[in-house]
Amino acid sequence: MNRATLPLILAGLLGAAMNCGTAHAAGAADQITVSDAYIRLAPPGAMATGAYMTIRNAGPGEVRVVKAASTVSRITELHTHLNEGGVMKMRQVKDIPVPPGGETVLKPGGLHVMLIEMRLPLREGDKVPITLGLDDGSSKVISVPVRNPG
Amino acid sequence: MACGHAEVVSRAKSIVIARVAKTRELGEAYEQATTEAFLAQGQRKAECPPRAALTVELEIAARSLNPPNAHQLAATPEVPDIGINPRYLLQAANGRAVMDGDFKDRFQLITFGYTFCPDICPTTLLEMAAVLKQLGNDAAKVQALFISVDPERDTLAQLRTYTEFFDARILGATGSPELVKRAADNFKVRYEKVIDPKANPAHYAVDHSAGMFLLTPGGQFLAKFAYGKPVAEIVARLREEIALRASADGAPLPGASR
């Protein structure tokens, strides 16, 4: 994987409707495009924050995101929320499926990539590489800007 | 009911349930009066009173009834929005004690959560901050509160930093586990620590009831806004309530000086 080219390739991520797969990964990663990705700017001292994005799958078969990793947090997990009678329950999920020819949206109140134990405080505008590991063993690195949704 | 003021109806029911003795005689009287009034409204095809006016009438009537009995309410089974008795005594992030009756001139907009929460709580606090911003000068008539249900991890200093990030007017509060439990029970807020046996035990999540509560100046329960309720609707409701109180200022409600 050529990480050096990523900032160039992904520089326009926030505004871009779509980021096409690049030649750095083989397999399912080539079928996957990620758009509208952002990391929620966390309050100072917060132990955790969430990353959100839309994952599109152009391929003929389902692709599952099975893990996520980031250099900025010690732990990176895939999470969802269940709303049970107004009680919000955050739970780790083993994967996030993306249907063939379809998309899965990670958004507040639902699926998200959770970054836990930040290694350094993030500032608005920072771009953070997040690696999405897919079920066929391939992986996709995306550059995710830190945004204050307020 | 005939006028479709569902919120007023639900408030009226909760007052009756919370404050009126549950005897057969009173139950029948309640049924009969409700039916008669409903039919009368339908036959007269009269103009419906505005919801605001009904709300005032209702609150005046409520004050003439017995005050709610905190012990009874805490023991009643959990029914959303019914029997909420918004009493709390906690410690604010500024180090002072804070309780429901402290804000005699201000509405209270309250949410429960915890600072480790990466998603629901920041979303709710962003919305709370947006409500305050959109209220403009009227925001001075509202005290926003964030009550942490995670006193083990949430220090007062941490709470303060956390809420100030969203809006310096949001006051963080928490307390001993017992006081937090009592406050949550009174609001019918449920919360529970969830420890993943495979994960670092310090990283537990806390399931909790999301959404916001609105209390009147003086601390009576007024409304509950479910998680995800649009900010514009919350602002509209607050403006309505603020206008209502302003017009009632000339004729203070009985007991308003309490």
Image (cartoon, coloured by chain):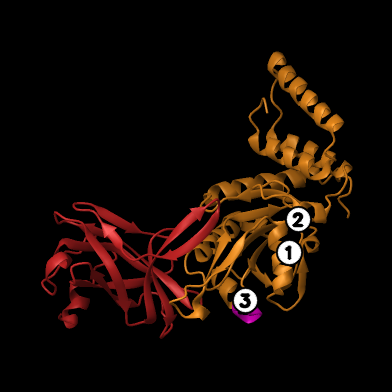
Chain colours: A red, B orange
Q: Residue B178 location in percent, x, y? A: 73, 70
Q: Would you say A129 lies left or right of B93 here? A: left
How crowded pointer 2 is (Cα within 10 Å; few <14, some 14-19, many 20+) is rated as some
- A8 relative to A60, above or below: below
Please name which of the two marks, 1 or 3, marks the residue nearer to the observer: 1
Of the two numbered discs 1 and 3 on the same chain, state the one appearing first in sequence. 3
Asked whether A144 falls inside the magenta stretch, the response is no
Which range of residues does the magenta coloring cover? Answer: B151-160
Of the two numbered discs 1 and 2 on the same chain, state the one appearing first in sequence. 2
Q: Residue B148 location in percent, x, y? A: 63, 69
Of the two numbered discs 2 and 3 on the same chain, state the one appearing first in sequence. 2
Label 1 with label 3: CB-CB less than 8 Å: no
Quadrant the C terminus of chain B occupies: bottom right
Q: Would you say B21 lies left or right of A86 here? A: right
Q: Chain of mark 1?
A: B
Label 1 with label 2: CB-CB less than 8 Å: yes
Task: Find residue B213 and name its label.
Answer: none
Residue indicated by mark 3: B160
- Residue drawn 88% across the image and 42% down it: B64
Q: Which SS class for mark 3?
A: helix
- Residue drawn 66% across the image and 64% down it: B145
Front-most of residues B187 and A5: B187
Label 2 with label 3: CB-CB less than 8 Å: no
Residue indicated by mark 2: B74
The CA distance from mark 2 to mark 3 is 29 Å
Residue B65, quarter of picture: top right
Q: Residue B143 location in percent, x, y? A: 69, 62
**Kind of residue sitting beneath label 3:** Arg
Q: Are marks 2 and 3 on the same chain?
A: yes
Q: Which SS class for mark 1?
A: helix
**Kind of residue sitting beneath label 2:** Ala
